[in-house]
């Protein structure tokens, strides 16, 4: 075997090994039962903490990574409008911030709402995990018995030194234009999903 042929085969072998390593790196790690339970616990805690400010909103914020984001979109698998990025902004989104929990009273944003998050599915993904769930909200027109389906959540999770955290959460509010909640408590236009055409079937 000539030296050039030998080197050529080595080059091909090295290329195959690099390609195999790249594929292995892209393949998501398997999630253990403990991983899935910890991730689902984040969503369970979220439903409680988004309804009632605790620890000036920082308990809510600490469900996320330090650079975590929360936003709203009207389509699955499509980014929308980010409402909060980072711990301080997320604490404010949780009803608090440096000044403490804001007073919750009739007419204030989120007053009387109760979030029910269900049908959660969690899957391994490169770098962590992804999840989807269904959101039903009670109290949408200011009365305790009013209830409305509000799409769901689409999440990305990562495992940190403190355990699993939400890296990004989108409220996929597919029916926001006909929402009773928004008719009762309108949001500023800057907080609504971008205006765009929906694909067929959504």
Image (spheres, grey):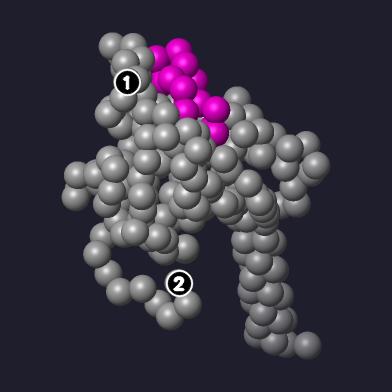
Is residue 35 one of those drawn in magenta?
no
At horizontal 46% and vertical 42% (from top left) the residue drawn is 146
Numbered range of the magenta stretch: 46-60
Our reading of the magenta stretch's main secondary structure is helix
Question: Which label is found at residue 202?
Answer: 2
Q: Nearer the viewer, residue 178 or 103?
A: 178
User: Which quadrant of the structure image shows residue 107?
Assistant: top left
Left or right? Give the position of 137 relative to 83.
Answer: right
Q: CA distance from mark 2 to mark 1?
A: 35 Å
Question: Which label is found at residue 194?
Answer: none
Left or right? Give the position of 146 relative to 15.
Answer: left
Residue 7 appears in the picture as rendered: no
Image coords of residue 11 (percent x, y): 64, 76
Image coords of residue 92 (percent x, y): 33, 25
User: Which quadrant of the structure image shows residue 85?
Assistant: top left
Nearer the observer: mark 2 or 1; the answer is 1
Q: Is residue 18 above or below residue 143?
A: below
Image coords of residue 37 (percent x, y): 73, 37
Question: Circle 1 sits in a helix, a strand or a loop, which is it?
Answer: loop
Q: Nearer the viewer, residue 66 or 173?
A: 173
Image coords of residue 181 (percent x, y): 35, 45
Q: Which residue is mark 1?
A: 105
Q: Tell me the quadrant of the picture where the C terminus can be found.
A: bottom left
Q: Label 1 crowding class (10 Å Cα cut-off): few <14, some 14-19, many 20+?
A: few
Left or right? Give the position of 128 relative to 181.
Answer: right
């Amino acid at each position: 075997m000539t030296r050039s042929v030998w080197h050529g085969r080595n080059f091909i072998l090295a290329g195959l090994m690099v390609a195999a390593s790249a594929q292995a790196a892209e393949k998501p790690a398997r999630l253990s039962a403990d991983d899935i339970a910890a991730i689902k616990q984040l969503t369970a805690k979220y439903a409680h903490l988004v309804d009632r400010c605790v620890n000036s909103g920082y308990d809510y914020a600490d469900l996320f990574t330090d650079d975590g984001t929360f936003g709203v979109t009207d389509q699955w698998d499509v980014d929308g409008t980010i409402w909060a990025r980072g711990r301080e902004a997320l604490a404010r989104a949780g009803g608090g911030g440096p000044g403490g929990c804001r007073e919750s009273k009739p007419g204030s944003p989120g007053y009387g709402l109760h979030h029910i998050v269900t049908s959660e599915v969690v899957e391994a993904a490169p770098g962590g995990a992804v999840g989807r769930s269904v959101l039903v909200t009670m109290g949408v027109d200011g009365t305790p018995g009013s209830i409305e389906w509000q799409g769901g959540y689409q999440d990305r999770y990562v495992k940190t030194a403190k355990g699993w955290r939400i890296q990004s959460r989108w409220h996929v509010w597919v029916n926001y234009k006909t929402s009773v909640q928004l008719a009762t408590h309108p949001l500023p236009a800057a907080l609504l999903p971008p205006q765009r055409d929906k694909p067929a079937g959504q």
